[in-house]
């Protein structure tokens, strides 16, 4: 918990929903500043590495404005194959502007979907906002078809001191200031300051992979790119024959 923002799970959900509702209209511009324009290419690469291909059914949890879902639609070839879910109604409204896909308001640890209905579940840079990792991954496993894959893209605390100091300066000071000046206002500055603090305080990768395994996912792994980006993957194993 980040005590300067909230003190329990209910307060966290209320704060996160409000923050993203306030910044949804500016989110893509703020994200472009943060990612220096490289986000689209990297998201598509992660999806392909996870095995996404045409004909697969995808659930994008915490869809936001649709940054991951857009790449998923491009790879799948049909908007009918991608479903988006988010807690923030304002984020869903922004996603609806550019994505003709089914959109659902909901939370990650209580997915309003049927059992065994999707082939790939994605979550892009939102796991830090989840209160109960194991409950969330159990829900992911429930809605996955046997053999389906979970892909969680996240940003973790850099191991190298030089990278950590650079990211602290960039995400902790530069990006919040630029976000505010570029039209995001005080809410945009708060979003990016909170973004960095959740990265800096994020649980270690071993805790996340342990929660995935405890939820019943197999072949769990964490791959790191550039000492910063973490890609967590796991699969729902085929159910045993009775």
Image (tube, helix red, strand yellow):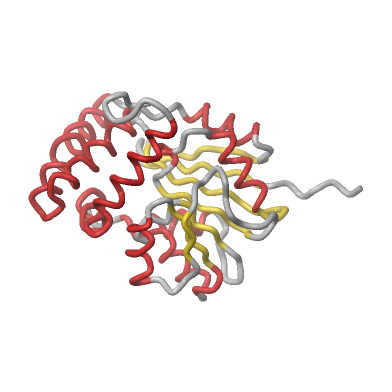
Q: Is residue 126 left or right of residue 57?
A: left
Q: Residue at x 31, y 46 (%)?
A: 18
Q: Residue at x 21, y 31 (%)?
A: 168
Spot occupied by residue 150 in the image (x, y as percentages of width and height):
57, 48
Quarter of the figure that contains the N terminus: top left
The part of the image, by quadrant, that contains residue 112 is: bottom right
Spot occupied by residue 189 in the image (x, y as percentages of width and height):
17, 43
Q: Return the residue found at the far right.
A: 242
Q: Residue at x 26, y 55 (%)?
A: 27
Spot occupied by residue 13 in the image (x, y as percentages of width and height):
40, 39
Spot occupied by residue 107 in the image (x, y as percentages of width and height):
49, 47
Relative depth, front residue between 138 and 163: 138
Q: Residue at x 54, y 58 (%)?
A: 59
Q: Return the residue found at the far left.
A: 181
**Depicted 242 relative to depicted 114: above or below:** above
Q: Is residue 138 left or right of residue 85?
A: right
Q: Is residue 164 left or right of residue 174?
A: right
The part of the image, by quadrant, that contains residue 128 is: top left
């Amino acid at each position: 918990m980040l005590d300067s923002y909230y003190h329990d799970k209910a307060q966290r959900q209320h704060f996160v929903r409000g923050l993203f509702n306030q910044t949804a209209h500016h989110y893509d511009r703020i994200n472009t500043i943060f990612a220096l324009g490289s986000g689209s290419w990297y998201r598509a690469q992660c999806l392909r590495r996870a095995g996404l291909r045409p004909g697969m059914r995808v659930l994008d949890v915490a869809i936001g404005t649709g940054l991951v879902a857009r790449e998923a639609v491009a790879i799948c070839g049909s908007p009918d194959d991608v479903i988006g879910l988010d807690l923030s109604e304002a984020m869903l409204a922004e996603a609806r502007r550019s994505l003709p896909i089914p959109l659902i308001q909901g939370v990650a640890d209580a997915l309003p979907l049927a059992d065994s209905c999707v082939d790939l579940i994605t979550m892009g840079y939102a796991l830090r906002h989840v209160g109960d990792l194991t409950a969330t991954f159990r829900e992911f496993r429930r809605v996955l078809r046997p053999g389906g894959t979970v892909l969680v893209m996240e940003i973790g605390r850099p191991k190298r001191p030089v990278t950590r100091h650079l990211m602290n300066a960039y995400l902790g000071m530069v990006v919040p200031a630029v976000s505010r000046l570029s039209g995001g206002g005080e809410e945009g500055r708060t979003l990016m300051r909170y973004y960095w603090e959740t990265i800096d305080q994020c649980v270690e990768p071993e805790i996340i992979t342990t929660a995935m395994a405890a939820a019943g996912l197999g072949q769990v792994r964490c791959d790191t790119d550039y000492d910063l980006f973490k890609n967590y993957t796991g699969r729902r194993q085929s159910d045993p024959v009775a």
